[in-house]
Image: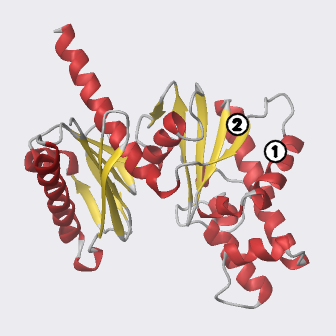
Amino acid sequence: MRHVIALDVGGTGMKAALAGPQGELLHRARRPTGRDHGPDAVVAGILDFAAELRAYGAEQFGTPASAAGVAVPGIVDEARGVAAYAANLGWRDVPLRDLLAQRLDIPVALGHDVRTGGLAEGRIGAGRGADRFLFVALGTGIAGAIGVDGRVEAGAHGFAGEVGHIVVRPGGTPCPCGQRGCLERFSSAAAVSEAWATACGDPDADAAACAKAVESGDPRAQAVWQDAVDALADGLVTALTLLDPRVLIIGGGLAEAGETLFTPLREAIRHRITFQKQPTLVPAALGDSAGCLGAGLLAWDLLSSTDRSEVTT
């Protein structure tokens, strides 16, 4: 069976799959990144993991993978295939695409983790069929993916979709990016956890606990939650004004709160828009498989573009 390698590299672990022509995951595997041993060990682990997947595919399906797609965190130069920087992995300017292509002897596509997950959500997940979508992941930070006609826009320098760094509270809380008042300092899962821990006096309290307290009617939790929703709506309306998406997909840990998040967020956005059209607001559908599924799509897209090039020449 013709298949591709799909690899989603996270801060602490790697999720991988062999993906079939329709995007189906034929085989799944996981392993730690080994980041405690330094960036060189992380890169070596990725190469070894990919090689093992290639060997498994050849044994199980009678032929090795036709291509590979890899999603990594941090700053990614997709055009050059370089993992430029990732604080949680400690690497800089790693030519990961070329290293993998040499090791596997197949074409390789490299993508940003959130944009890759957004590609999967937009094409085969919650945004299926939408010509324009915006995917926003509310996790430790906030990042997004801008979808246009089945592809995701990386931007001229690889920074498109960084909605977490829209300034929503000018002069507010400092952000590690160097600005003050960035969206992710108020509406990420990490920000909500921090605010709720302070409000309730429990240093171990997190965003999930805050959501439960909101549902139980705790006024302190409701205040923390509403502050986060208001800031999120401010940032999203700015993004909607610029991008005019048909579908707005919200994923990440904070989205697991379900309608505790989505009901007030829809209302907050509706209250803020004037001439803009309110997009359909939906939760992400693919869960933690989105990265692998998106990496598989990157690989199949790479093969499709290669096939088209060979036909035209």
Q: Is residue 40 above or below residue 107?
A: below
Choose top left, top right, bottom left or bottom right for residue 141: bottom right
Q: Which mark is residue 147?
A: none
Instruction: Tell me which residue sits at (76%, 63%) in the image.
Output: 228
Instruction: Tell me which residue sits at (60%, 41%) in the image.
Output: 126
Label 2: element kind: helix
Instruction: Tell me which residue sits at (38%, 50%) in the image.
Output: 292
Mark 2, Cα crowd under 10 Å, few <14 / some 14-19 / many 20+, is: many
List the residue tagged with mark 1: 269
Q: Quadrant of the N terminus?
A: top left
Label 1: element kind: helix
Please state if 2 lies on the left or on the right of 210 as rendered: left
The earlier-in-sequence mark between 2 and 1 is: 2
Q: Is residue 174 above or below residue 170?
A: below
Choose top left, top right, bottom left or bottom right for residue 88: bottom left
| Callout 2–callout 1 Cβ contact below 8 Å | yes
- Foreground residue, 59 or 222? 59
Instruction: Tell me which residue sits at (40%, 57%) in the image.
Output: 74
Given the current orientation, which residue lies at the most extreme top position?
312
List the residue tagged with mark 2: 240
Residue 24 location in percent, x, y?
A: 37, 42
Choose top left, top right, bottom left or bottom right for residue 20: top left
Mark 1, Cα crowd under 10 Å, few <14 / some 14-19 / many 20+, is: many
